[in-house]
Image (cartoon, rainbow, N blue to C red):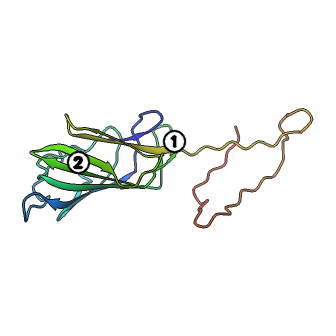
């Protein structure tokens, strides 16, 4: 599942990649893995790739035993109400033994990432997208009333900051 960390609402548009990095049995690949009715899943040797979609967590069956890396990217994604979230690139390493997740660890520690691994049910839930909302208001210093017609400019001063997806609107 790919969820918003603050509300547990499922998010659409995060890109996920699962790679079998160390098969328990030499020569094992992911070619026999099944994933239900999903049509957007790509299997390439030891890697499965997909994009999160609404109300459709990816269920993988016939995963061979071994060590896996689950990576997530996606930039900015929207929830059902059109709210924007920023997906934090994240990586989880886990091991499957006898068809059950036995160990797991977050590879890139970040306070904005939350992996939940339910070893009993072999379910991994990722919660790491945070809402990108900033409210800026121009007010009169003497009475704190909004000043209509003020022109404000937002500038990215940090290297690598991209403002192309910023949307401004009046409340």
Residue at image point 46% right, 45% down: 129
Q: Secondary structure at mark 2?
A: loop
In this view, the residue farthest toward the right is: 142
Residue 27, image x, y percentages: 7, 65
Residue at point 45%, 52% (across, down): 88
* Marks 2,1: beta carbons within 8 A: no
Q: Residues within 10 Å of mark 1 (few under 14, many from 20)?
A: few
Q: Is residue 78 above or below residue 121?
A: below
Q: Which residue is mark 1?
A: 82
Q: Nearer the viewer, residue 113 or 162?
A: 113
* Rendering coords of residue 143 (x, y %): 90, 32
Along the line of sight, the residue nearer the viewer: 87 or 91: 91
Q: Marks 2 and 1, how far apart in space?
A: 24 Å
Specify whether 115 is left or right of 64.
right
In the rendered structure, which disc, 2 or 1, sits on the residue that comes first in sequence?
2
In this rendering, the answer to whether 8 lies above or below 45 is above
Q: Position of residue 122 (x, y in %)?
A: 20, 39
The quarter of the picture where the N terminus appears is: top left
In percent of width and height, residue 149 lies at 84, 46
List the residue tagged with mark 2. Answer: 38
Name the residue nearer the viewer: 159 or 73. 159
Camera-nearest residue between 105 and 64: 105
**In the picture, which quadrant includes the C terminus?**
top right
Name the residue rendered at 69%, 42% in the picture. Answer: 135
Q: Residues within 10 Å of mark 2 (few under 14, many from 20)?
A: some
Q: Quadrant of residue 18?
A: bottom left
Q: Secondary structure at mark 1?
A: loop
């Amino acid at each position: 599942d790919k969820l918003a960390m603050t509300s547990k609402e499922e998010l659409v548009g995060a890109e996920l990649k699962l790679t079998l990095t160390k098969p328990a049995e030499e020569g094992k690949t992911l070619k026999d893995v099944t994933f239900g009715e999903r049509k957007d899943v790509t299997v390439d040797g030891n890697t499965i790739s997909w994009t999160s979609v609404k109300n459709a967590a990816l269920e993988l069956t016939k995963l061979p035993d071994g060590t896996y890396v689950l990576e997530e990217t996606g930039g900015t994604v929207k929830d059902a109400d059109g709210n924007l979230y920023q997906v934090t690139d994240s990586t989880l390493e886990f091991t499957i033994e006898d068809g059950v997740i036995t160990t797991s660890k977050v590879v890139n520690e970040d306070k904005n990432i939350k992996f939940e691994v339910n070893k009993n049910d072999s379910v991994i839930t990722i919660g790491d997208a945070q809402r990108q909302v900033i409210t800026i208001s121009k007010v009169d210093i003497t009475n704190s009333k909004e000043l209509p017609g003020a022109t404000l400019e937002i500038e990215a001063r940090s290297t690598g900051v991209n403002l192309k997806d910023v949307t401004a609107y009046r409340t």
